[in-house]
Image (cartoon, rainbow, N blue to C red):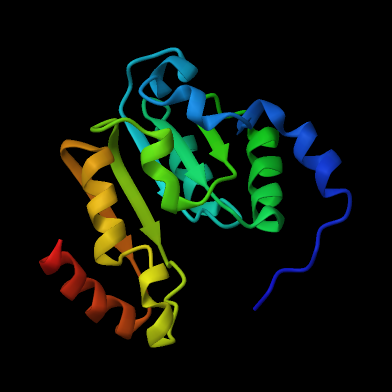
């Protein structure tokens, strides 16, 4: 289901600038400096309205969190909530996950979360899945040695396909 267009989106996003990284490529290899500490760096890809990442950041102030969302309607809801709670270890990115190696150095991320990602059911679109072999190989590059990929889904077909993709990667 497509999200309704949000009113005054540009103005609202501008108001959320303190939690929205506008130039992610400039932070490649230096994300911890953005937070001003050396804490572990966790990334959620496809954060949606931000419920998971906001609550996780609230409960774990000793970890730096980045959240990616390319749907601006969802992103604005997440950033506005984060602004209300004033979470210094949480930042959002309006980017596509396909370009992770453009914004993260090899081994820079300690954990990646994929929570209830779009299953892209038509077979011709399976390559768009966040768990596709090609994307998993990208995660391997940006994950630190011993880094973790946490995957949750309620879609049986995506789960079974991901098992195959993991074996291939």
Horizontal arrangement in the rendering, residue 69 relative to residue 149 (left or right): right
Q: Residue 156 appears in which quarter of the rendering?
A: bottom left
Q: Is residue 89 visible?
A: no
Q: Residue 17 appears in which quarter of the rendering?
A: top right
Horizontal arrangement in the rendering, residue 120 relative to residue 15 (left or right): left
- Nearest the viewer among 43 and 86 is 43
- Residue 77 coordinates in the image, percent (x, y): 69, 51
Q: Residue furthest right?
A: 8
Viewport quadrant of the N terminus: bottom right
- Residue 26 coordinates in the image, percent (x, y): 50, 23
- Count of numbered marks: 0
- Residue 11 coordinates in the image, percent (x, y): 85, 39
Height in image: 101 above or below 29? below
- Image point (23%, 41%), residue name: 141
- Nearest the viewer among 49 and 27 is 27
Viewport quadrant of the C terminus: bottom left
- Image point (65%, 50%), residue name: 75
- Nearest the viewer among 50 and 14 is 14
Horizontal arrangement in the rendering, residue 65 relative to residue 151 (left or right): right
- Residue 111 coordinates in the image, percent (x, y): 28, 42
Q: Is residue 74 visible?
A: yes
- Image point (44%, 43%), residue name: 56
């Amino acid at each position: 289901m497509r999200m309704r267009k949000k009113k005054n989106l540009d103005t609202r996003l501008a108001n959320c600038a303190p939690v929205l990284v506008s130039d992610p490529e400039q932070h490649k290899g230096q994300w911890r400096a953005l937070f001003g500490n050396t804490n572990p760096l966790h990334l959620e890809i496809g954060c949606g309205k931000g419920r998971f990442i906001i609550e996780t950041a609230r409960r774990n102030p000793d970890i730096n969190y980045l959240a990616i969302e390319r749907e601006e309607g969802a992103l604005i809801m997440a950033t506005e909530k984060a602004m209300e709670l004033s979470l210094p270890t949480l930042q959002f990115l309006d980017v596509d996950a396909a370009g992770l190696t453009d914004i993260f150095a090899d081994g820079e991320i300690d954990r990646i979360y994929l929570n209830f990602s779009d299953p892209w059911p038509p077979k011709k679109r399976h390559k768009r899945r966040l768990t596709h072999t090609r994307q998993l190989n990208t995660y391997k590059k940006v994950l630190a040695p011993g880094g973790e990929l946490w995957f949750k889904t309620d879609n049986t077909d995506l789960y079974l396909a991901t098992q195959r993709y993991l074996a291939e990667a």
